[in-house]
Image (tube, coloured by chain):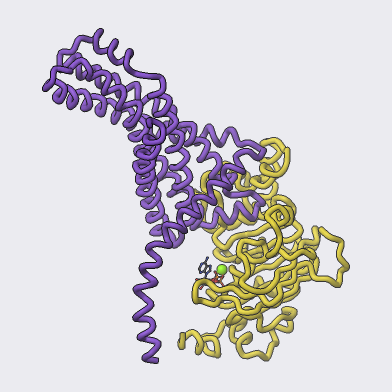
Amino acid sequence: MNSSPETEPLIRIEGLSKSFGSKQVLNGVDLEVMRGQSMVVIGGSGTGKSVLIKHVIGLLKPDAGRIVVAGQDISTMDMRGINKLRRKMGMLFQNAALFDSLPVWENVGFSLKQHTKLSGKEIKKIAVEKLKMVGLSDEVSDVMPSDLSGGMRKRVGLARAIAVDPEIILYDEPTTGLDPIMADVINDLIIALQKKLNVTSISITHDMTSAYKIADRIAMLYQGKIIEVGTPEEIRSSDNEIVRQFVSGSAVGPITVEVMRA
Amino acid sequence: MSSEKTWTFLVRPVERIGETFVRPLWLLGGITTMLVKTVRLSFRPPYNLRGIVKQMLEIGVNSLPVVLITATFTGGVLALQSYTGFRRFSAESLVGTVVAMSMTRELGPVLTGLIVAGRAGAAMAAELGTMRVTEQIDALETLATNPVKHLVVPRFLGSLLMLPALTVFSDAVGIMGGFFVSTKLLGANPTTYLTRTWDYLKVMDIYHGILKAFFFGAAIALISSYQGFNSKGGAEGVGKATTRAVVLSSMTILVSDYFLSAWMFK
Ligand SMILES: Nc1ncnc2c1ncn2[C@@H]1O[C@H](COP(=O)(O)OP(=O)(O)OP(=O)(O)O)[C@@H](O)[C@H]1O
Ligand SMILES: [Mg+2]
């Protein structure tokens, strides 16, 4: 990507608004992620976290605002430009979104098959390697996705997202549905990718343990806006009532009042 | 507040009527856009030959048995009915000609089209619809792969090429069905029957039927892919998209058949 000066964020979201029909989901989101940084977005269910990261990879077009990735505005780019950028990005979908018609290894190696001249054998070797990184043995490589457990699907999705060694990775709830030990393996993987390969990432999570562990910075999305951004320490000791209720997982507080009223 | 209510009361019916007229236009626009994209991407390398062959096989395997059975009996019933009619003015010898012409010009391509719409078209809409609602199409995009090129182009070309092939089978089997009924059940002379069929059937009849089949093949794939791509709302949405794909493909086949015939046989 562009060797832009390091003071310039690699991902910059400005005034992003999006509604579906009459439902306003995002309402002026601002967020900056520096190169090599791990940003975690937290927020209640249905607040638009998934919608937010889908904008970053150009799956959704903003109603208003800009998404600048590596110095280019993704919302005004043509397909060719977006696809060029996407080859340096990886995304883990919340529900994995594996291709049911392909066995696990072809899922993981999909991008390599599409965009490189590597042979099937070489692709499979890389796929098995990536599967190992997410804690899956090579026995699963020939299994069809429909025969996997939820947690395994998620990890295959993760392997697919990291298959082309992307510079930017978007993780939509990477540890949801995993047992605590496997969740920590994934946390460590995310950290390792960031430290070793200088990956820039945005992760969405509800899992505060994971958030504190992997984040350089945490941002909280609430009612269509980012209401607070800070280091894990800052978030942990935030005096914003909403943030405090969310991170402590309390049923009593301003968020609950909103939910009850809605 | 109450003036707003009156306003809604007045506007709602107008909106509904407007929608009724606008929706088909929207659909037509959507399918045309998909046609343009698909054709353009069909010519852009890399060509996915394996994908096209896979689709052709799928369509063929899905539909061939049904096409053959349907065509046999259609040829048979054509012979039966036209024999009954023609006997009234002693023109029984023309049965073979009528069967052959009806099969090649009309029933071969149209029945094949309807069967493929019901089987392969439905399968396409359901498969692509499922991929849409489970975000697999989004996943393709994030992997820098054009979903229309990857999913629609092979289906389009596969269907475009397979439909004429199935139609040729259907024509042949239909004519055989008519031959069987005429000679075995109605006592026609096999040699005369075949000579009559052969003498009066023009290459153009077969050729025009095949041309129709190309068109139907393209229409089925486009309509079904479009419906699949635009399905939303989980399993129920996929079900609706599949139904719409079959209904719309079948209607398109029957309506366009008239215009294609009027245009080609004038
Ligand atoms: N394609 C779409 N069409 C219509 N509405 C949508 C679409 N995508 C998302 N929404 C709506 O946007 C809102 C936010 O959805 P989103 O999936 O981003 O939530 P989320 O924050 O990721 O929630 P969760 O934590 O449960 O995954 C929801 O109300 C959802 O119904
Ligand atoms: Mg989500």
Above or below, A114 against A251 in this view is above
Q: In the picture provided, is B77 more to the left or to the right than A254?
A: left
Q: Residue furthest top?
A: B191
Q: Is residue A152 visible?
A: no
Which residue: 50% across, 35% down?
B158
Chain that the image shows in purple: B
Which residue: 73% across, 61% down?
A168
Q: For this rendering, which residue is in front, A113 or B14?
A: B14
Residue B151 appears at what percent x and percent y?
Answer: 55, 45
Q: In the picture provided, is B207 more to the left or to the right than A54?
A: left
Which residue: 70% across, 47% down?
A129
Above or below, B39 against B133 in this view is above
Where ligand 2 lies, by image quadrant? bottom right
Above or below, A47 against A97 in this view is below
Q: For this rendering, which residue is in front, A244 or B134?
A: B134
Chain that the image shows in yellow: A
Residue B40 appears at what percent x and percent y?
Answer: 61, 43
- Image quarter of residue B200: top left
